[in-house]
Amino acid sequence: MNINKYVPTYYHTSIFELNPNDVINKGYKIVFSDLDNTLDCYIDKTPSKTVFDKVKAFKEVGIKFIIISNNYKRRVKPYADKLGLQCIWLLLKPLKFRLNHFIKKNNINKKDVLMIGDQLFTDIALANKLGIDSILVKPLTDKDQKFTSFRRKKEKLYFKKIKKENKLKLWR
Ligand SMILES: [Mg+2]
């Protein structure tokens, strides 16, 4: 089991426990956030009040917040539109070509970016491939779509090993 590809830069309980000022103070200007089980459960069509408030807080300190998801347009776009956020759907995480293209097209400096997600094999693996810093958060719920749930079990084993080898650095 090679865990190195899946070690996040940081670990934190939830995006909702994240203080946007700390994100700024660490030098990040852009957040790439996963959607399902990072911001809301996949069945929640409308962002919760907590999400609205958090996104507002990020915007207020000047952070550009972008939703990046492997889910379909019909899931991602209406959700992001309600928050007034830019989004990318069908990203095919952990494959890097779509996000890489977006980064180049928008002249984004990877050093400015913080990736936030709940999955080692998609969110964190992609961040590491691109050399982007990341925060692994706990999945919000235990509800997953089929294409996600088959990965979960294996991810739990990797997570345990990362923890055991003291490679989990807490966000603070
Ligand atoms: Mg997710």
Image (tube, rainbow, N blue to C red):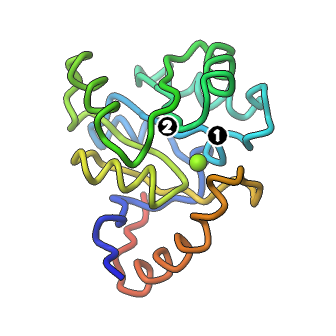
Image position of 46 with respect to 143: above or below = above
Mark 2 and mark 1 residues within 8 Å of each other at the beta carbon: yes
Residue with the most extreme bottom position = 164
Q: What is the CA distance from the residue labelled 2 to the residue labelled 1?
A: 8 Å
Say what amino acid the circle numbered 2 marks.
Answer: Ser
Q: Residue at x 72, y 54 (%)?
A: 144
Image position, residue 5 (x, y; %): 30, 65
Number of dots carrying numbers: 2
Indicate the quadrant where residue 92 lies: top left
Q: Quadrant of the C terminus?
A: bottom left
Res. 14 mark: none
Q: Secondary structure at mark 2?
A: strand
Image position, residue 135 (x, y; %): 43, 53
Residue in the foreground of this view, choosing between 102 and 63: 102
Image position, residue 97 (x, y; %): 29, 35
Image position of 34 with respect to 5: above or below = above
Which of the marked residues, 2 or 1, is nearer the chain's N terminus? 2
Q: Residue at x 60, y 66 (%)?
A: 152
Residue behind mark 2:
33
Disc 2: CA contacts within 10 A as few (<14), some (14-19) or many (>=20)? many
Left or right? Give the position of 35 relative to 124: right
Q: Respond yes or no on whether mark 2 lies under 8 Å from ligand 1.
A: no
Indicate the quadrant where residue 162 lies: bottom left
Q: Secondary structure at mark 1?
A: loop
Res. 39 mark: 1
